[in-house]
Image: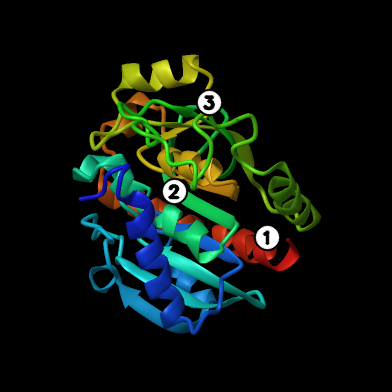
Amino acid sequence: MLTPENLYEKAKETAEFLLQKTNGKIPEYAIVLGSGLGSLTEDIDIETEMPYGEIPHFPVSTVEGHKGSLIFGTLSGKYVMAMNGRFHYYEGYSMYEVTFPERVMKMMGINKLIVSNASGGVNKSFKIGDVMIIRDHINFFPEHPLRGKNDQRFGPRFVNMSEPYSKKMIEVVENYAKARKICYQKGVYLGLSGPTFETIAEYNMVRVLGADAVGMSTVPEVIVAKHMGMEVFGISVITDIDDPELIQSVNHEEVMKEAKKAEPVVRELVRALVRDY
């Protein structure tokens, strides 16, 4: 069981295990592949792949569409680590387990993180299949990932969250997209615990609070990454929208299908970021 008291030692043990598997090679980027976005692995020249169950202290993803393996290889000329499937609070994991991979990433020496997800669009100008660059987020999870005794070896007690998503990374992706006339949105992501999809009233609440999209992941991971001084880029696929008629038919299969349609754009933007930054 992961606790504030043993988190550092267990993350260090896992990091050392993984570095042995990579012969000491430190990835420049870590990438978290969210719902339906696992095909980015097709762009990676894979050197090593390990199921989560073979990695010390790693949880195992239970969500359909999340393969549950760690991949090491080359993407856009750079050595990367990719999580093919993440861990969610709604699966019953503690926040320490949900964000354990980010602890391990930093202790391996990785300083750049890319997170992706599928989300529901509440901005009235959004449509299903849009790709949204995350510029900020709102944390509405019932538990904070930094709650408990702080270990200064990870980072400070109070974390500056004025720039959770790197402005420089966002600029690189926007410049690339604009030069190639790739359509994208940019907005605020609000994180809820799930696993239920939002009610119409909850969609309205999210919009009133100032968010453009809502989902069930990402925010705890980014908080922990920032706790350790990592630079983060986030991207979201809008797989359902705030429409009373469409909401009635939303389900996990539809979310996966819509995420799959947007994968080529997400893959292109991620490849460009890794290559150019």
- Please state which of the two labelled residues, at mark 1 or mark 3, is closer to the viewer: 1
Q: On the rendered structure, is 17 left or right of 90?
A: right
Is 80 situated above or below 188? below
Q: Which element is circle 3 on?
A: loop
User: Residue at left 29%, top 70%?
Assistant: 55
Mark 2 / mark 1, whichever is N-terminal: 2
Q: Which residue is mark 2?
A: 117
Residues 113 and 19: in front is 19
Picture quarter containing residue 48? bottom left
Q: Which residue is mark 1?
A: 273
The amino acid beneath tag 1 is Leu
Local crowd at mark 2 within 10 Å, few (<14), some, or many (≥20)? many
The amino acid beneath tag 3 is Lys
Q: Give the numbered dot on residue 124.
A: 3
User: Residue at left 39%, top 27%?
Assistant: 243
Q: On the rendered structure, is 165 left or right of 53?
A: right
The amino acid beneath tag 2 is Asn
Q: On the rendered structure, is 272 left or right of 141?
A: right
Are discs 3 and 2 less than 8 Å apart at CB? no
Residue 213 drawn at (x, y percent): 48, 32
Is 47 situated above or below 227? below
Label 2 to label 1: alpha-carbon separation: 17 Å
Mark 1 / mark 3, whichever is N-terminal: 3
Label 3 to label 2: alpha-carbon separation: 20 Å
User: Residue at left 46%, top 72%?
Assistant: 41
Q: Give the numbered dot on residue 143.
A: none
Residue 72 drawn at (x, y percent): 47, 76
Residue 219 drawn at (x, y percent): 45, 38
